[in-house]
Image (spheres, coloured by chain):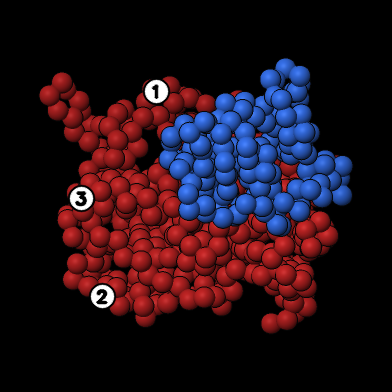
Chain colours: A blue, B red
């Protein structure tokens, strides 16, 4: 196996891909959006429960795609729980840059949760696979759309 | 026929020689030998086609049907010779029945927009099948919105076999057109179009055949089929992109209004009114894809010189060999096992999504398609989000199949 394949399909990604966390539809979700990647046919729905204080009390998703998109969605739900809406937005922007820019510098982003950045770094291997960047970012785009009150997002 | 018997016949096609004609096959990908197994999406180009296009541009290029000078006449001759080559390729009675388009998609849109808008009205029915490419679904959806036509869908069984009886049940007094694929791009099913056409013609219903995936694999004879419209695209028959073909029976083409307006397709134009040329020029507004049409002519000559029996024997041998090899892989399921099948092999694996399969194969130098193959309704029919698809052409060998099999074993290693 080539090194970049090994970096893309790290153990933690394979694990989240096979056993996604928070794969469910919370009854009390008050935000949701559907994401669609027309290129590969992946579709998923992200559910959020945002409290009056703007904190994300619960986040989950439904729908299955490739290992990368499923793992990314699963990891995202773990990371976002307890964050504020504003933090979720910043993490979305940070993650997007991480997946696309070789000059990504975590210090340039105002993220308190250093652990989240470290965990997301395992997905940064998609940089070497431009066709797969959309797989990694689909759940995040969808989450962002849900926060902004859009019902649908397409990554094409 | 066993694989070994087929293999004994196959060498009639000199694949080693063919491979030398395709420069791209020598190009390593990620330092690996390229196993190109995505010809159903677009085929590679032989040196002969590349040279023709270069030569046409370097030595004999001008606009066609316009200039009163030697170069323009020369370019026009070559362009029209290509039209005659296409007519012979399809055994069309006349090259006036050959309309050049951009691709198959445009050819079907042309029929839907010109013939469909003129002759179809609310409640009229168009019959398609479950194994259509989006190119033969969406143009009819546009007419459905505009005119209120009704689409009927002829089913396939679990193996992907086209069900002729069920198709015939759909024909009724409201049926105005059958638009059907010759070969499924997603699962390889060969549709018995001759029988389909016969059944439709018993009710005086014309038939459009989408031959995108048939033209590269088998002899097409529009007269023997009695097809009313037959469409295919250049880039899948080893020709350039940007050039496609609509064959239409002359009575039909003559009854149809222009598809687009502009230069080339007019007889006279004043500020009040235009009059239009006869087919095929009526449907070719603007400067056409000149060198692409000439290149398509060369691609057809190249393909036909190989002999259809040889091409088919080699591809069927590869299909059978690949089917056997892939069945060795635990957790792999072939999608589409129709009795009559072109060299297109769709599959899924229980351990990995087709997109992940595609990425891992890519790093092994194996190019396949992963996705819904522009056939989302068919994917829904089989309750799959996507499949991985290997498709074969004249330059493929058992080595390509072996390389595919090894890479698939690696997928299992990573995800198993």
Viewer can see residue B379: yes
Tell me the residue that label 2 is attached to.
Answer: B202
Tell me the residue that label 3 is attached to.
Answer: B147
Q: Nearer the viewer, residue B229 or B406?
A: B406
Residue found 82% across the figure and 42% down from its top: A7
Q: Does residue B292 lie above or below B343 as drawn?
A: above
Q: Quadrant of the N terminus of chain B?
A: bottom right
B354 relative position to A55: left or right: right
SS for callout 2:
loop
Residue lying furthest front:
A53
Residue found 31% across the figure and 57% down from its top: B249
Viewer can see residue B14: no
Residue depth check, mark 1 versus mark 3: number of the one nearer the observer: 3
Q: Nearer the viewer, residue A27 or B50?
A: A27
Q: CA distance from mark 1 to mark 3?
A: 42 Å
x and y, in percent, of residue A24 in the image: 56, 55
Q: Nearer the viewer, residue B260 or B286?
A: B260
Tell me the residue that label 1 is attached to.
Answer: B67
Q: CA distance from mark 2 to mark 1?
A: 47 Å
Residue found 74% across the figure and 77% down from its top: B3
Q: Quadrant of the C terminus of chain B?
A: bottom right
B96 relative position to B274: left or right: right
């Amino acid at each position: 196996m080539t090194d970049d394949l090994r970096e893309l399909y790290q153990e933690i990604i394979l694990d989240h891909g096979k056993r996604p966390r928070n794969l469910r539809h919370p009854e009390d979700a008050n935000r949701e959006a559907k994401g669609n990647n027309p290129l590969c046919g992946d579709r998923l729905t992200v559910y959020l429960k945002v409290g009056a204080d703007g904190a994300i009390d619960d986040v989950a998703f439904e729908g299955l795609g490739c290992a990368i998109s499923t793992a990314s969605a699963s990891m995202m739900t773990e990371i976002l729980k307890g964050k504020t809406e504003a933090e979720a937005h910043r993490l979305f922007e940070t993650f997007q840059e991480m997946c696309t820019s070789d000059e990504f510098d975590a210090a340039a982003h105002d993220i308190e949760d250093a652990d989240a950045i470290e965990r997301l770094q395992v997905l940064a291997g998609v940089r070497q696979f431009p066709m797969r960047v959309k797989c990694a970012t689909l759940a995040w785009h969808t989450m962002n759309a849900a926060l902004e009150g859009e019902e649908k997002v397409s990554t094409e | 026929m066993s694989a070994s018997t087929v293999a004994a016949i196959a060498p009639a096609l000199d694949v080693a020689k063919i491979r030398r004609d395709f420069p791209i096959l020598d190009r390593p990908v990620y330092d690996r030998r390229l196993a190109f197994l995505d010809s159903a999406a677009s085929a590679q180009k032989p040196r002969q086609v590349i040279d023709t296009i270069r030569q046409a541009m370097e030595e004999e290029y001008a606009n066609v049907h316009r200039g009163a000078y030697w170069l323009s006449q020369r370019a026009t001759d070559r362009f029209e010779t290509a039209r005659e080559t296409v007519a012979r390729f399809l055994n069309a009675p006349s090259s006036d029945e050959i309309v050049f388009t951009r691709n198959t998609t445009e050819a079907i849109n042309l029929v839907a927009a010109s013939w469909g808008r003129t002759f179809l009205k609310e409640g009229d029915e168009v019959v398609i099948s479950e194994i259509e490419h989006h190119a033969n679904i969406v143009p009819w959806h546009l007419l459905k919105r505009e005119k209120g036509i009704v689409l009927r869908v002829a089913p396939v069984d679990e193996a992907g076999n086209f069900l002729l009886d069920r198709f015939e049940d759909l024909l009724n007094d409201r049926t105005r057109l059958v638009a059907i694929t010759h070969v499924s791009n997603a699962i390889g099913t060969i549709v018995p179009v001759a029988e389909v056409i016969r059944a439709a013609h018993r009710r005086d219903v014309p038939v459009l055949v989408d031959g995108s995936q048939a033209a590269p694999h088998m002899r097409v004879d529009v007269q023997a089929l009695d097809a009313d419209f037959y469409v295919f695209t250049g880039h899948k028959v080893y020709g350039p992109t940007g050039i496609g073909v609509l064959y239409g029976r002359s009575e039909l083409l003559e009854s149809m209004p222009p598809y687009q307006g502009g230069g080339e397709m007019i007889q006279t134009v004043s500020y009040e009114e235009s009059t239009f040329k006869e087919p095929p020029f009526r449907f070719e507004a603007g400067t056409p894809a000149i060198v692409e049409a000439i290149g398509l002519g060369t691609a057809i000559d190249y393909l036909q010189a190989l002999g259809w029996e040889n091409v088919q024997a080699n591809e069927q041998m590869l299909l059978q060999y690949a089917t056997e090899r892939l069945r060795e892989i635990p957790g792999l399921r072939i999608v589409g096992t129709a009795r009559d099948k072109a060299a297109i092999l769709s599959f899924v694996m229980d351990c990995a999504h087709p997109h992940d399969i595609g990425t891992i194969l890519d790093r092994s130098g194996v190019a396949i398609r992963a996705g819904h193959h522009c056939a989302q309704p068919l994917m829904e029919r089989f309750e799959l989000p996507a499949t991985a698809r290997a498709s074969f052409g004249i330059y493929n060998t058992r080595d390509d199949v072996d390389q595919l099999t090894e890479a698939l074993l690696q997928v299992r290693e990573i995800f198993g």
